[in-house]
Image (spheres, grey):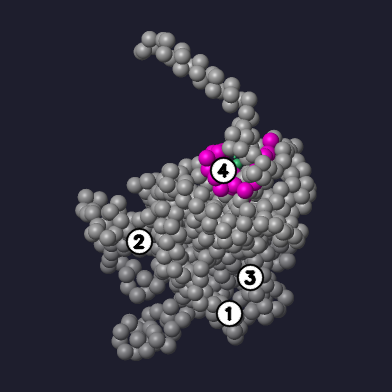
Amino acid sequence: MAGQPLAELRDASKFFGSVIALKDISMAVSAGEVMCLLGDNGAGKSTLIKILSGVHAPSAGHMLVEGREVRFKSPREALDAGIATVYQDLAMVPLMSITRNFFMGREPTRGSGVLSRLDTAFADRVAREEMHKIGIDVRDPTQAVGTLSGGERQCVAIARAVYFGAKVLILDEPTSALGVSQASMVLRYIAQARARGLGVIFITHNVHHAYPVADAFTLLNRGRSLGTFRKEEVSREEVLNMMAGGKELDQLTAELEEFSRADGASPQGT
Amino acid sequence: MAEQTVSAPGADERLLKTPLSRKLLNRPELGAVAGAVLVFFFFGIVAGDSGMFSLKGIVNFLEVSALLGILAIAVSLLMIGGEFDLSVGSMIGAAGVVIAIPAVQFGWPLWLCIVLAFGVAAAVGYANGMITVKTGLPSFIVTLAVLFILRGLTIGATRLITGRTQVSGIRDVARDDWLAAIFGGDAFTGLFAWMAEAGIIEKRMDGLPVVPGVPMSIVWFVILGTLATWLLLRTSFGNWIFACGGDKIAARNVGVPVTRVKVLLFIFTACAATLVATIQVLDAGSADTNRGLLKEFEAIIAAVIGGCLLTGGYGSAIGAMFGAIIFGTVQMGIFYTGVNTDWFKVFLGVMLLIAVLFNSYIRKKVTEAR
Ligand SMILES: Nc1ncnc2c1ncn2[C@@H]1O[C@H](COP(=O)(O)OP(=O)(O)OP(=O)(O)O)[C@@H](O)[C@H]1O
Ligand SMILES: [Mg+2]
């Protein structure tokens, strides 16, 4: 889909004290496009999406939403602009219930003025429905999130972002703790969001998740961008190599073969 | 747990039917309510014939409870929001003289002095909140500093202006003040007079009822407790309080205005302290720079007995109310039974220890897989 990008970074940098987390990054996501962010641990992927979601202000550079320059002072402003995020650490409060976490910061209310009150029945119903769609049957939406399994927790965060994401959906390693069926459900969500005209930014270390849904790949390395590649330009193997640095992977394969030979040779029990 | 049964088909088969007892156990205020029942029961037996549970006795210990409870309700909201306020005790002393000095020394109308006191409280709460949030320092330390600063300022300024540490003479200026009427005195006086007339409650020798009405402190206590509970459980702002105390980074990342929530909660505790100060000043007819000493700890103890976690994110305003009622009942109960009041402190410490152990057990139950 051509035209103006939904969200865009131009020469953005982020420093934490003396640490250069990002340097001169330019990246854009358009409506109906899935942009996959690739890079090693510590490459700066999470930092980049935290700039887009209003958690960090960029130390230098510009940020544009639908062509207009913006400066988010808080994640709330990013959410108001239609940018919803699944953070790597999920942003869940373990002591609070599923429903209260689901609607945290954006609670549905009834009545107005001083009589404005939580619409708990609506909230419970929506939380349960949205979780059902992702393939998790919530036993009791008033159950504390702290009692959920890691994957279930991740699903609450994803369902929440999908429910509130109006323009841009950002997912930071959303499938890391998920079972096969929930992970494929998330990929289906991403495809659905694209079909609805949202822009999606997707971070993953799993090439089998990245390659089928992505339209483009942006590669980060030690805080710098190595460029953006359209899917037509690269093969699955090339993406895999970009993720890991191809040479290292070849080396690993050779080493593993070495191990298995050694295993076979040595007697058992040592 | 043994009586749990598998639920009927149709519902999730992994869900055991939760017995009512288990549901109650998940309420943060359970411990405090049980404790209050126990304490009533105990003093009902030990001090049953001492007049403690006569109408006058009940009003007495409820009044003590209410003054602490007003503080404890505000402190519990702040604790759920993940912060402490150790300056509330000093705030009581400060607010008292902020009301008394202009009223007595400068001849200001009392209502203006009360408004001024609440303005000062809002400023102190705002400062507490902003310093805590912006520096990221523990509120324990920030408000400990403010505790000393406020107390010192109060004593210093009062001595400078009046030459003493007490300001009396409030009674005369309070007599016809419209605003003083909602903080001091009694409510439902007409009803009590009628009940005395009808023989429902006892009369004094002069024909007036033994208790003229419900003290305003108790009225405020109930109103604030109800509002705080509604706020916590039924409004967006309540959800934000739990979120800020549970995990402030997560809360911020999903759009909760953490700074605003915390600052408002600090303002609320300072204003609650000022409410207590106003009631006391009108009741005693004087202000004393030493008022409110150690009240910050008593309020925290009441909130913890009421189920608030020291780490934030969990607790209840009703619990804090019952925590304060336990506090007031035991304090007055010990007085009525004639036991040396030194033992009250021992009881407090033991109570606090039990409450903390109980709370941490409950927290494990709530957060860990069952
Ligand atoms: N708040 C912070 N203060 C200081 N340094 C930070 C901060 N946040 C991130 N960094 C640093 O910035 C670099 C990039 O971190 P980031 O979390 O963006 O990596 P990532 O690409 O998401 O890694 P991963 O794949 O492990 O999630 C790291 O070296 C990290 O130490
Ligand atoms: Mg990351």
The span from disc 3 to disc 1 (Cα, nearest Å) is 13 Å
Chain under label 3? Answer: B
Per the image, the residue denoted by label 1 is: B180
Q: What residue is at 65 percent from the left and 62 percent from the top?
A: A81
Residue A121 in view, yes or no: yes
Gap between marks 4 and 3, in whole Å?
Answer: 58 Å
User: Who is closer to the viewer here, A81 or B114?
Assistant: A81
Q: Residues within 10 Å of mark 3 (few under 14, many from 20)?
A: many
Inspect the image, locate mark 1, and give the three-letter code of the amino acid beneath it: Ala
Q: Residue at x 47, y 46 (%)?
A: A183
State left or right for residue A15 relative to residue A140.
Answer: right
Name the secondary structure under disc 1: helix
Q: Nearer the viewer, residue A209 or B15?
A: A209
Q: Position of residue B32 (x, y in %)?
A: 37, 58
Please state the extent of the stretch shown in magenta in the rendering. A201-221
| Residue at numbered disc 4 | A210
Q: Are marks 3 and 2 on the same chain?
A: yes
| Amino acid type at mark 2 | Val
Instruction: Using the rendered view, name the quadrant where residue B101 is placed.
Output: bottom right
CB under 8 Å between callouts 2 and 4?
no
Task: Specify the label residue B33 is tagged with.
Answer: 2
Q: Amino acid at mark 4?
A: Ala
